[in-house]
């Protein structure tokens, strides 16, 4: 049944799923029309809201580019690459390979969402490469989908935007709900059970979609032969080096700057604990990667290779920021959330909060951004219904991560690294969208926050 569902959704995605850039533009049109139809905003007001939001993700976009290129440079260093290759060589069959990629990505995403994106992409690529070199047929699009499906655990993990926000002193909803400790959200019975079940359901769902017939398998070489070709290193001898070459290949320079970075990293974790955010993850990736690449010129080459995957992020993030602007400033988010609130009671409210968050996430694919624009509406509704605020926060978090399986925004980094297209993976991740919905809804209905 799961395999049949995967085949149906895969055919649909290959026929109807446009390039992520076109997806962003079509969502822009849809948001504009909805804003005109459902709010009091005028045609040019919506354009103004669009521009007002257009550039707000520039910092975030740069952070995403950095996590991609620094993660790529770290993963392609000799010692890390050998470790990934050994891990990728463990599966002796396609189903085991898919299970391994999905589980690794899900665990990494729970630790940190940025880490999960890069780990899922690199594992998919290396497992596909290993299968090719060992003559084990592996469906590469499904490996890529498994790497992205693991992202479904992030908003219940250690870098979860909404739960961490409401646990922070001075957050924007503090006057209404106070400070909610993570013991009531991330480490609640609800989230612990839901996360553990997802860690089993995601890999099993992906594994069950493995093609049976060899003619249905698209290997890594069918996508890009360059991913499996051995890298050629043209090293200069010491006699051939001029002064500039010696500086570029100086391990002394690498160690000096690398140890400066490590000194701060050790201080950060020693004084702040395991408090991960994008900046410290990027900083750690950067300086550990510099050390492991051994010489400055090796690191520069690795980063140059990694930047090839950034084009989608650079041009598409502003469009999604513009969509967020139209949603926020026109009041469209409140309208959408209000539909679900109007038909809710104390029993059904968490489910409708989850579904509304999933819908809003298609237009505002940022956990923190979505909480900022949707959070006040949902909190007000929960208070009116005398419903648990911690469970409301987790319902929003689950909805936000749930429809990432349909929204290709967060897949851009993975697509860049694996060189797959959105239509290659979305059909499979839509199956995970269906199976995980059962987990989320039952958890919200039956488990205490």
Image (cartoon, rainbow, N blue to C red):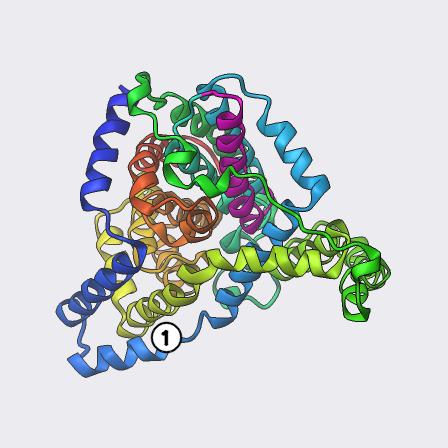
The residue to which callout 1 is attached is 53
The magenta span reads 111-136
Q: Residue at x 65, y 55 (%)?
A: 281
| Residue at 58%, 47% in the rendered image | 115
**Residue, far left:** 37
**Residue drawn at x 62%, y 32% as measured from the top left:** 85
Q: Closest to the observer: 345 or 140?
A: 140
Horizontal and vertical percent position of residue 322: 33, 71
State the image quarter where residue 41 is shown.
bottom left
Q: Residues within 10 Å of mark 1 (few under 14, many from 20)?
A: many
Eyeballing the image, is 121 above or below 376? above
Along the line of sight, which residue is nearer the eye, 87 or 440? 87
Relative placement, left or right, of 30 versus 2 is left
Whether residue 330 sits left or right of residue 54 in the image: it is left
| 225 vs 5: above or below | below
Residue 162 colored in magenta in the image: no
Q: Position of residue 431 (x, y in %)?
A: 31, 32
Q: Can residue 175 be seen in this snapshot?
A: no
Side of 242 relative to 92 (left or right)? right
Magenta segment, principal secondary structure? helix
Q: Residue 379 location, x and y as percent?
A: 40, 57
């Amino acid at each position: 049944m799961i395999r049949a569902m995967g085949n149906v959704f895969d055919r649909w995605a290959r026929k109807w799923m446009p390039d992520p850039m076109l997806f962003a533009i079509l969502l822009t049109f849809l948001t504009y029309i909805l804003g005109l139809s459902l709010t009091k905003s005028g045609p040019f007001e919506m354009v103004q809201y669009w521009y007002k939001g257009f550039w707000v993700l520039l910092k975030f976009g740069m952070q995403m580019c950095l996590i991609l290129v620094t993660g790529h440079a770290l993963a392609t260093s000799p010692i890390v690459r050998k470790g990934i290759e050994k891990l990728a060589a463990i599966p002796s069959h396609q189903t085991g390979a898919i299970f391994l990629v999905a589980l690794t990505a899900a665990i990494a995403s729970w630790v940190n969402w940025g880490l999960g994106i890069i780990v899922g992409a690199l594992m998919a690529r290396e497992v596909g490469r290993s299968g090719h070199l060992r003559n084990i047929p592996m469906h590469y699009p499904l490996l890529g989908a498994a790497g992205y499906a693991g992202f479904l655990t992030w908003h219940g993990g250690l870098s979860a935007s909404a739960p961490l926000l409401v646990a922070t002193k001075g957050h924007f909803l503090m006057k209404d709900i106070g400070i909610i400790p993570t013991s009531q959200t991330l480490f609640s019975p609800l989230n612990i059970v839901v996360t553990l079940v997802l860690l089993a359901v995601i890999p099993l769902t992906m594994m069950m979609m493995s093609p049976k017939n060899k003619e249905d398998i698209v290997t890594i070489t069918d996508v890009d032969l360059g991913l499996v070709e051995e890298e050629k290193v043209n090293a200069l001898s010491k006699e051939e080096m001029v002064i500039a070459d010696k500086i570029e290949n100086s391990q002394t320079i690498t160690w000096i700057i690398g140890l400066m970075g490590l000194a701060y990293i050790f201080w950060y974790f020693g004084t702040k604990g395991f408090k991960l955010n994008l900046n410290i993850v990027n900083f750690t990736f950067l300086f550990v990667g510099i050390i492991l690449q051994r010489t400055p010129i090796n690191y520069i080459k690795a980063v140059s290779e990694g930047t090839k995957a950034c084009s989608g992020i650079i041009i598409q993030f502003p469009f999604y920021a513009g969509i967020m602007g139209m949603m926020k400033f026109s009041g469209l988010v409140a309208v959408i959330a209000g539909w679900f609130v109007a038909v809710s009671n104390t029993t059904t409210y968490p489910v409708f909060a989850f579904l509304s968050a999933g819908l809003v996430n298609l237009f505002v694919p940022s956990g923190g951004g979505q909480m900022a624009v949707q959070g006040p509406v949902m909190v007000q509704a929960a208070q009116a219904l005398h419903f648990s605020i911690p469970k409301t926060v987790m319902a929003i978090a689950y909805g936000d991560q749930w429809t990432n399986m349909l929204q290709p925004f967060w897949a851009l980094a993975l697509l860049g690294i694996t060189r797959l297209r959105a239509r290659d993976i979305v059909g499979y991740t839509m199956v995970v969208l269906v199976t995980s919905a059962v987990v989320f809804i039952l958890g919200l209905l039956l488990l205490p926050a």
